[in-house]
Amino acid sequence: MSDTAGVPDLEREAFRAFNAVVEPLVRAGLGGPLFSPFGAIVLETVGRKTGDIRRTPLLATVCGNLTIVATFRAGRSQWVKNLALQQSTKWWANGQLHEGRPVVFAQSAEWPEAERIPELVRPFSETAWRPLVEAGWAIAVLAAR
């Protein structure tokens, strides 16, 4: 098993195979956060190397017009690195396309300035999220327009 950019081929291929099956189902509305604040979404990012649209199914929490996603695989999650470079993004939830502004908290990204952080989650950014990010997590807040 070779190792490219720190990610074993087997792990990368397993995620690709899983995402190929799950992504169209989630985009169609299956498993979305409709009756609960938790559920699956599909995040669209632009590949920072290729410029291609990338769609990644993720588990999310919805709070008002905010959708929050997190991963403990921050260093190996390409969606985190791609999203950190974007000023706007799209995501599918409950069969509907949403657009908005991402705010990314990750070791691979600059910590967002306070005014960029949505007011609802601002208190968590320093007290709870900074220690998680320092432990290798990444958190993204998607603020719908």
Image (cartoon, rainbow, N blue to C red):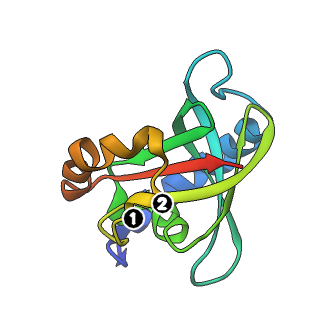
Residue 23 relative to residue 134: left or right: right
How many labels sit on residues?
2
The percent position of residue 3, horizontal first and vertical second, equals 34, 75
Q: Residues within 10 Å of mark 2 (few under 14, many from 20)?
A: few
Mark 1–mark 2 contact, CB under 8 Å?
A: yes
Q: Is residue 100 above or below residue 92?
A: below
Q: Residues within 10 Å of mark 1 (few under 14, many from 20)?
A: few
At 58% from the left and 84% from the top, the residue drawn is 49
Instruction: Please tell me whether mark 1 sits on a helix, a strand or a loop.
Output: loop
Q: Is residue 42 above or below residue 54?
A: above
Q: Nearer the viewer, residue 102 or 29?
A: 102
Instruction: Please tell me whether mark 2 sits on a helix, a strand or a loop.
Output: helix
The percent position of residue 88, horizontal first and vertical second, equals 65, 64
The quarter of the picture where residue 107 lies is: bottom left
Marker disc for residue 88: none
Q: Residue type at mark 1: give it.
A: Pro
Q: In the rendered image, which residue does mark 2 sit on?
A: 116
Q: In the rendered image, which residue does mark 1 sit on?
A: 112
The percent position of residue 1, horizontal first and vertical second, equals 35, 70
At 37% from the left and 78% from the top, the residue drawn is 5
Q: Nearer the viewer, residue 75 or 93?
A: 93
Q: Residue type at mark 2: give it.
A: Arg
Residue 89 relative to residue 49: left or right: right
Residue 133 relative to residue 29: left or right: left
At 63% from the left and 37% from the top, the residue drawn is 65
At 50% from the left and 53% from the top, the residue drawn is 14
The percent position of residue 2, horizontal first and vertical second, equals 35, 75
The quarter of the picture where residue 32 lies is: top right
Spatial separation of the CA atoms under disc 1 and disc 2: 6 Å
- Residue farthest to the top, as pictured: 35
